[in-house]
Image (tube, grey):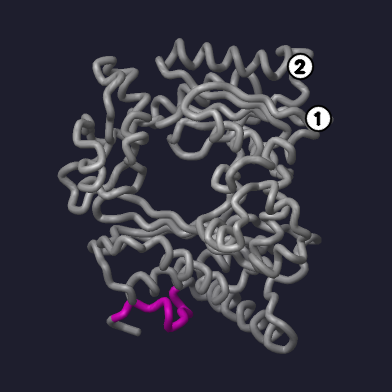
Amino acid sequence: MERSIIHLNVADFAAAVERALDPRLAGRPLVIARPAAARATVFDMSEEAFRAGVRKGMPLALARRRCPEAQLLPPRPERYARAMRVLFETALAYSPRVETGRADGHLFLDATGTRRLLGPPMDIAWRLRREVRARLGVTPIWTLAPNKLVAKAASRLVKPEGEYIVAEGEEEAFLAPLPLELVPGVERCDLRTLGSFRLRRAGEVAALPLEALRVLCGARAGFLHEAVRGIDPSPVRAAGEPAPEIAAEERFAGDTDDEAELAAALARLAGRAGAELRRRRLAARRVRVVLHGADGAEALRRAALQPPTADDFLLRDAARRAAAAAWSRRVRLRGLALACEGLVFPPAQRELFPAAGERGEGRARLMAAIDRVRRRFGEEALRVAAALPPETA
């Protein structure tokens, strides 16, 4: 059956919500940030501020230089969460398969198979936009495509307002002329690598055979080879269905910029996530690390695992790579979170411990022994040295 995935997106969501609540803000550049925070960063901004060069995560001082006329407001996450709930509830009337992320103003809705009951998916999208505008006072973008990746790329193309339909079979042709940065999942490191070979558009990368792409991009090649062709079999999760990931988080006793303390926390979180992966007989393709700054800003980075693994040590190493990339602005940290994504279930999963030969077998026995000890005596009964706080390591 042909899939019909709607992507609904309120551009610059926090700024749009603030303007809906205070119409006097309309038409003026708007920057949302905590002005009192040390080394404050931009939480969100309006389209006018974006055109002036303001970006999310940018130091507030730089944003003020780029757009001195901008109105400054503190972020109010509870407002955005309430608005997001309204957005979700409105969409839920049309399909039980509605997937949202954080309170960021976007969602995916799977309208596959709803035509007889609710009409064509395009009509559903039009009605959704009308209802959201009536309930929230904001006007979302909507796009319709056979999968989530292409629908999101279309939203990026028409931002800040509009609609777009990509028909079944037209995914690769639609993406071909687009800059690579508009393809969801393409990361900065990919742009740098491919750009060094003058590959800047999706169609240019799609023209490469997978073997050539592996030479250029290594473990990222498989994902990129499918993404630039508009291939994305991932489902829209049903309402209330948990995200396919295993996560753990930790808060520091006090704000810190100690690298050793961060490394120890990453090792502890990797150990917890690895144990849960092994308990469920899963392996992870990616590790996501989110660093929570003392100034209220968040930095998120991912690191790939090739092949997928449930090995604590490989998870830890990937988490360290992601954290090093995320901590480019050396602010003090309040806490961090680690998540294992792209989970693989047997029988597709070949090994939980992909190291070759005897080394892999030895690592598997070690992990199994650690799990047995912790199940019997508790998590704190056995800890690797890297996970100990710096003063006790």
Q: Residue at x 27, y 47 (%)?
A: 41
Q: CA distance from mark 2 to mark 1?
A: 12 Å
Image quadrant holding the N terminus, namely top right
Q: Please state which of the two labelled residues, at mark 2 or mark 1, is closer to the viewer.
A: 1
Q: Residue at x 66, y 13 (%)?
A: 123
- In percent of width and height, residue 226 lies at 72, 51
Q: Is residue 220 left or right of residue 172?
A: left
The image quarter in which residue 350 lies: bottom right
Q: Is residue 174 left or right of residue 188?
A: right
Q: Magenta span covers which residues?
A: 380-390
Q: Is residue 96 visible?
A: no
Q: Is residue 226 left or right of residue 63?
A: right
Query: Relative to 18, does residue 230 appear above or below in the rendering?
Result: below
- In percent of width and height, residue 37 lies at 19, 48
Image quadrant holding the C terminus, namely bottom left
Q: Is residue 132 magenta?
A: no
The image quarter in which residue 42 lies: top left
Badge number at residue 2: 1
Q: Nearer the viewer, residue 323 or 139?
A: 139
Query: Relative to 148, does residue 295 appear above or below in the rendering?
Result: below
Kindly identify which residue carries mark 2: 115
- In percent of width and height, residue 250 lies at 38, 60
Secondary structure of the residue carrying tag 2 is: helix
